[in-house]
Amino acid sequence: MLRIEFVTDLGARVSVEVESADKLLEVQRQYGRLGWTSGEVPQGGYLFPLDNEQDFDWSLIGARKFTNNEGEDMVMHRGHAYRRRELEAVDSRKLKLPAAIKYSRGAKNTDPEHVREKADGEFEYVTLAIFRGGKRQERFAQPAGRSQPAQGSRPAAPAGNGPRPQAAPAGRPAPVAARPAPVAAAVADEEPPF
Amino acid sequence: MLRIEFVTDLGARVSVEVESADKLLEVQRQYGRLGWTSGEVPQGGYLFPLDNEQDFDWSLIGARKFTNNEGEDMVMHRGHAYRRRELEAVDSRKLKLPAAIKYSRGAKNTDPEHVREKADGEFEYVTLAIFRGGKRQERFAQPAGRSQPAQGSRPAAPAGNGPRPQAAPAGRPAPVAARPAPVAAAVADEEPPF
Amino acid sequence: MLRIEFVTDLGARVSVEVESADKLLEVQRQYGRLGWTSGEVPQGGYLFPLDNEQDFDWSLIGARKFTNNEGEDMVMHRGHAYRRRELEAVDSRKLKLPAAIKYSRGAKNTDPEHVREKADGEFEYVTLAIFRGGKRQERFAQPAGRSQPAQGSRPAAPAGNGPRPQAAPAGRPAPVAARPAPVAAAVADEEPPF
Amino acid sequence: MLRIEFVTDLGARVSVEVESADKLLEVQRQYGRLGWTSGEVPQGGYLFPLDNEQDFDWSLIGARKFTNNEGEDMVMHRGHAYRRRELEAVDSRKLKLPAAIKYSRGAKNTDPEHVREKADGEFEYVTLAIFRGGKRQERFAQPAGRSQPAQGSRPAAPAGNGPRPQAAPAGRPAPVAARPAPVAAAVADEEPPF
Amino acid sequence: MLRIEFVTDLGARVSVEVESADKLLEVQRQYGRLGWTSGEVPQGGYLFPLDNEQDFDWSLIGARKFTNNEGEDMVMHRGHAYRRRELEAVDSRKLKLPAAIKYSRGAKNTDPEHVREKADGEFEYVTLAIFRGGKRQERFAQPAGRSQPAQGSRPAAPAGNGPRPQAAPAGRPAPVAARPAPVAAAVADEEPPF
């Protein structure tokens, strides 16, 4: 018998029994659709193969995709909105890197130091996940026949509110960057658990 | 079988069994009325739909409403008193925000850095909850027919002691802002659990 | 079935089953008399009604009263000795406060930042508990018929008898302030659990 | 009955029952091959006898060996790649040290302060494990008959091949040093659990 | 039924059932002999009566005595070597202290701030345990008839490697002071659990 520890969408600490190791991802999907998460985001963000990005099942980490009203692909995770960014391959003499897709947001002054990553100038950001290299793993894909609930959703978030350098530079109050969160978070809450 | 971890009103770490996921909020209400909480307040505070503010069941997060003797709406949570503030909608070129209601208090020098949010000048505050946008969710409302116990209460807190900029600027000792807490906290303790 | 997590007098992490919520305080008393504690001391210290100070059952928080060689009322908690101080009521134009009794000690350089409170000058102190206002709660009182070991305590310490700067100023090594601890801690260990 | 707490390869917190203490390492091997880890890396890295390095079972700590494109022996642990380095014995008047083999990586700005170790100049590194002295313990060796996936490893890396300052100096963004991780991590994920 | 949480000698988080409170120390001894520990070392170190130092059962806290090849009494705890020091009684006008025996080591730059204690000049140290005053408690003594396994052991640690001011001043890399650890730790690992 296994037991998995979650933080619910309301921030409560709740553990759930799991019959066996092979049932684990199923349980994570089930509660992840409620916005429940288990453990911390790894330093530098979750790492997944690039070929899993297309149909990645975000419920595995308690997150959900949505499209803001600028038409940008976003992911909501624990009340924070992360923007999808495509990173081209780098092939210089001192650095060779395959192409990647990254989900990140601007850092907020309430973010602990160890999750902040420096970018150009003063700007700091926080990464939720990076899809790069590797080989596709079916276990990370959305179950066949289930369309991502939030896929078509359009939360009534005001325009130009995504976390971006000028919107929430490190050292500025959180409210600004935080504002889209309540809306989308509330929408996520409306989704049925199963 | 689920298990939820609480911190009791005396600060003890106690976990309680929960039959099933659909019984979870009921258990949180039951122990929340005793001032028990589970997990941490999310960064930037709890996020709820604006339409839930009117009859929000504060026991869900181990908090309770009360009115200080200046007639202000306050919420007591883990011995800290938070004041209700109405934020008007913002509709400028660089920022568009729906109206919101926020419960916050002045920061104390015993508050960890990551919960402090900067305001004008030196002042720092801590947010318990923000109600904004989204769509009302019945699961957050007070159970019909149950009047909020503390609704009519009037703790004998001395005048002009609520956490406010001049009362507890960051970097000043906690005692001042903390003073109303023991009183109201004690009152809360007198409430029957069920 | 509930489960409470303790830190034993030897610092071990041990959880104990509790039949029901109404048996919880009884279990906390039972193990608290061994010096076992559960959870952390709340920011700014535990808050209790003033009318509970007289016969407060310190075993509820794993502490014990004792009288030092100078005849002062002290409380031992996790190897730290806290001194009893009476705070008179304040009734000025900018601040109105009821009388209170506080148990505090000088900060040690091994104390984490968030528990230190600033006092006059460089001195920092740590508060274990404050008794102020509120309404007496019987559940906090010593069970009738059980005399507190250290109850035969001397009259209240004279005013302004807080932890002395020269005894353990912040930034000085812990040993000085810590020295009374081992002795009393050992004494506490000799007490029978039941 | 024992219970061991793991962090899965997806960062989830999952505990597993273990029949008895003598079955513990077996369970750690079983889940460690999935990239699950239990507890934190000890300050300064894991310490093992030098004679265990040759056939050390990295699954015991949720890690795996692999050989990078430059033919260097590396170990992947929680998405971080550590390079094998051979440290020659030191026998000076002020310091006598036996030979050792160390697995370390350059520090990233997302690494907490307490895991960083200073090297020459500005460079900081993080150590996963040190093999030095002691006496070989069979319990740390790969089970007979099971070949380590990445075992087909190249000869020892040339001397002075530690993590390069220019590769990931402290204070620079993580992405650079992090880049090899996703790939290898994904490969690790493909391995069957049993 | 009680449950105690350990960190094993490999750093894994494992909890073990304990029939009743009076069996607890027995279980701590049993696993402590494997180098398993429960909870953190108290701020300023463990506190025990002076009369227990002679035959203290170090397995109670997952530690073991050994004698380095300079003939000094040392204690190994979680891979760190602590040196035995006798502190004479102090009887000045401003300070009166009974004699004590202290086990401490030089601080390493990987030690968190709150465990470091300042000494003369730049030097910082970390205390594992202090034996002072109090009254002997039999429960802390080695079980009759059982000789301390490591008592006569002589780990092959190179000369002059104990943690000492000049060996590991605060702010200097850990390796030097850390070096004796692997050896002795490995030796400890060879001891049978029961």
Image: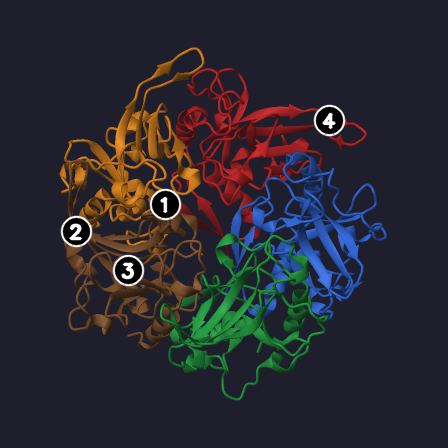
Chain colours: A red, B orange, C brown, D blue, E green
Viewer-closest of A109 and B147: A109
Q: Disc 1 designates what residue?
A: B110
Q: Is residue E168 above or below residue A50?
A: below
Total labels: the figure holds 4
Mark pair 3, 1: CA separation:
34 Å
Mark 4, secondary structure of its residue: loop
Residue in the image at 24% along x and 74% along y = C149
Do callouts 1 and 2 point to residues on the same chain? no
CA neighbours of label 2 inside 10 A, class few (<14), some (14 to 19), many (20+): few
Q: Assign the N terminus of chain C to one quadrant of the image.
A: bottom left
Q: Amino acid at mark 1?
A: Thr
Q: Left or right: where does residue D78 sit relative to residue E27?
A: right
Q: Chain of mark 1?
A: B
In the rendered structure, the residue with mark 2 lies on which chain? C
- Cα–Cα gap, marks 4 and 1: 47 Å
Give residue A48's position: percent from left, percent from top. 64, 37
Q: Chain of mark 4?
A: A
Q: Which mark is residue B170?
A: none
Decide if residue C27 is in sight here. Answer: no
Query: In the rendered image of this protein, does residue E131 appear above or below residue A144?
Result: below
Residue on which the image places disc 2: C88
Secondary structure at badge 1 equals loop
Q: Amino acid at mark 2?
A: Glu
Relative to C191, C113 lies left or right: right
The mark nearer the N terminus, 2 or 3, is 3
Which is more foreground, mark 4 or mark 1? 1
Q: Amino acid at mark 4?
A: Ala
Q: For the C terminus of chain C, give its image quadrant.
A: bottom left
The chain under label 3 reads: C
Q: Which mark is residue A89?
A: 4
Q: Are marks 2 and 3 on the same chain?
A: yes
Q: Is disc 1 on the same chain as disc 3?
A: no
